[in-house]
Image: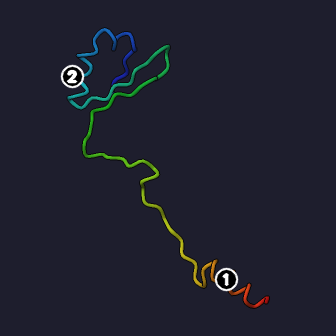
Amino acid sequence: MKTVPFTAFRKNASGFINEVEQGETIILIRHGKPVAEIVPFSASIEKKPSWKQSVVRFEIQGSDLSSAILEERETSE
């Protein structure tokens, strides 16, 4: 991992991109604070958006809510 000031990156972007292609990770610093991380692209990592990820579903034993409501209505009549 390499830390580079933004101005140095701007002056020699092509050289730094070559390093990233070789596997180097570069952290860009602006005004003394990290502002970006440049990492090599990996086609094998395909992160799904959270709305497309599978979720954990819970199942409760017993009747479902709609059946319980209908049953309650029948017994109260």
The residue singled out by tag 1 in the image is 68
Give yes or no for contact between labels 2 and 1 (Cβ–Cβ under 8 Å): no
Q: Measure the C-alpha gap from mark 2 to mark 1.
A: 65 Å
Q: Look at the image and tell me in which quarter the C terminus lies.
A: bottom right
Q: If you read the primary sequence from the N terminus, does the residue marked by circle 2 or circle 1 appear first?
A: 2
Percent position of residue 15, x then y: 23, 16
Q: Which mark is residue 37?
A: none
Label 1: which secondary element: helix
Amino acid marked by disc 1:
Ala
Residue located at (79% from left, 88% from top):
76
Percent position of residue 44, x then y: 25, 46
Residue located at (49% from left, 20% from top):
33
Q: Residues within 10 Å of mark 2 (few under 14, many from 20)?
A: few
Using the image, determine if residue 60 lies above or below residue 34.
Answer: below
Q: Residues within 10 Å of mark 1 (few under 14, many from 20)?
A: few
Q: Nearer the viewer, residue 11 or 71?
A: 71
The residue singled out by tag 2 in the image is 18
Query: Total of numbered circles in the picture?
Result: 2
Q: Quadrant of residue 60?
A: bottom right
Q: Quadrant of residue 37?
A: top left
Using the image, determine if residue 20 lies above or below residue 11.
Answer: below
Amino acid marked by disc 2:
Asn
Residue located at (40% from left, 21% from top):
28
State the residue lying farthest toward the front.
Answer: 77
State the residue lying farthest toward the right.
Answer: 76
Residue located at (21% from left, 22% from top):
18
Using the image, determine if residue 12 lies above or below residue 74.
Answer: above
Q: Look at the image and tell me in which quarter the N terminus lies.
A: top left
